[in-house]
Image (spheres, rainbow, N blue to C red):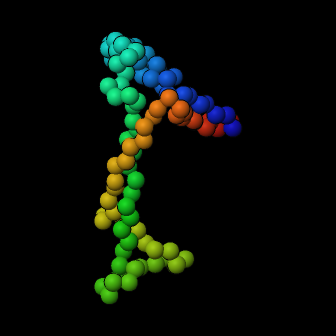
Amino acid sequence: MSKLTFFSYEVQEAMRMYAKEKLGLDIPEDNISVHDHPSIEYRTPIYAYKKHKNGKEIKDKYGCRTVDWDKTKYKTQYIDFDDDAEITFYLGD
């Protein structure tokens, strides 16, 4: 298995190159993020579980709670992608 690791400044440079080549935007190096560091936005599920009329949770044949996907909500969270941050992609062989 191979892995590719990029530091935050490499990701910012790649974003600048992409914006210039694909979108025709020339973004100055010091203007890639209006804040000190870009942030990564992601969503995490807040699971709701199916229940019987009596309020007890419904379980599957293995005894695990059954997720009610219609009532499950998502919370948006943020991570700062600062100078010490890196992102790694694992590639199959």
Vertical placement of residue 70 versus 29, above or below:
below
Depth order, front residue of 84/32: 84
Residue 91 visible, this orientation: yes
Q: How many marks?
A: 0
Vertical placement of residue 25 versus 55, above or below:
above
User: Which residue lies at the image location 36% right of the left edge and 74% below the top edge?
Assistant: 50
Vertical placement of residue 43 versus 30, above or below:
below
Q: Position of residue 19 (x, y in %)?
A: 37, 18
Q: Position of residue 17 (x, y in %)?
A: 43, 16
- 53 sits to left or right of 8: left
User: Which residue lies at the image location 32% right of the left edge and 59% below the top edge?
Assistant: 73
User: Which residue lies at the image location 34% right of the left edge and 62% below the top edge?
Assistant: 72
Question: The N terminus lies in which quarter of the figure?
Answer: top right
User: Which residue lies at the image location 32% right of the left edge and 25% below the top edge?
Assistant: 34
Q: Position of residue 63 (x, y in %)?
A: 52, 78
Depth order, front residue of 16/36: 36
Question: The C terminus lies in which quarter of the figure?
Answer: top right
Residue 22 visible, this orientation: no
Vertical placement of residue 74 versus 55, above or below:
above
Residue 16 in which image quadrant: top left
